[in-house]
Image (cartoon, rainbow, N blue to C red):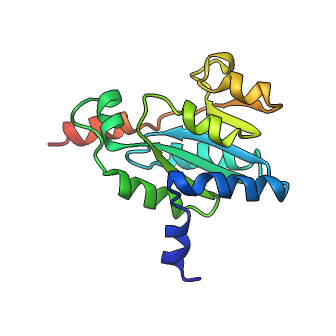
Amino acid sequence: MNNYKSIKSKIIQADQLSALIKNWKSSGEKIVFTNGCFDIIHQGHIDYLAKASDLGTKLIIGVNTDLSVSAIKGKHRPIQDEYSRLMILAAMQFVDAVILFKEDTPINLISSIIPKILVKGSDYEAKNIVGYDVVTQNGGSVETLDFLEGFSTSGIEKKIIESN
């Protein structure tokens, strides 16, 4: 498969998710799930996602739609459209699937996937992470990862604005 098709094949539609998850679970894969806006990819994202990937054998990333990013971050965001954000994440070798979600939280995705490991940043307490109950009640765990100090999309955005 050529690289472009390989990347595109990682962008999953909702109607493809069930079959993919069933296949991976029947093959004994340890599915890790995380989610976010991932508007401007930076070193902090790479560090976080690579560490999340290391916790299992398949990494799925739930990506907020443009509308949900605007609702969370403000009308000036996202800077990159949802398709661009999906393509960038799908191009990472340690990412196995990316899927959009439009709801306020990824609880529906988490309930569909029932990952072995749910990952968020350590700015959250594990028991307060959306999906904690679903994952732990099904034998999985919720892990938090420290962010790489000094890297954030908001910081990059501020630096760009201040340079004008």
Task: Decide: is 115 above or below 30.
Answer: above
Question: Could you tell me which residue is drawn at 57 percent across and 22 percent down?
Answer: 123
At horizontal 22% and vertical 36% (from top left) the residue drawn is: 76
Residue 39 visible (yes or no): yes
Q: Position of residue 59 (x, y in %)?
A: 66, 51
Location of residue 33 by image quarter: top right
- Check the picture and name the quadrant holding the C terminus: top left
The picture places residue 150, in percent across and down from the top left corner, at 47, 34
Viewer-side residue, 38 vs 31: 31
**Number of residue marks:** 0
Query: Which residue does the image show at 56% across and 73% down from the upper left?
Result: 6
Residue positioned 60% across, 53% down in the render: 17
| Residue 148 visible at all | no
**Direction from residue 125 to residue 36 in the image, left or right:** left
Taking 92 as reference, is 63 above or below it?
A: above
> In the figure, 27 relative to 35: above or below?
below
Percent coordinates x, y for residue 110 in the rendering: 62, 36
**Looking at the image, which residue sits at the far left?**
164
Point out the image quarter for the N terminus: bottom right
Left or right of residue 23: residue 149: left
Please identify the residue farthest to the bottom as the structure is shown: 2
Q: Position of residue 111 (x, y in %)?
A: 64, 34
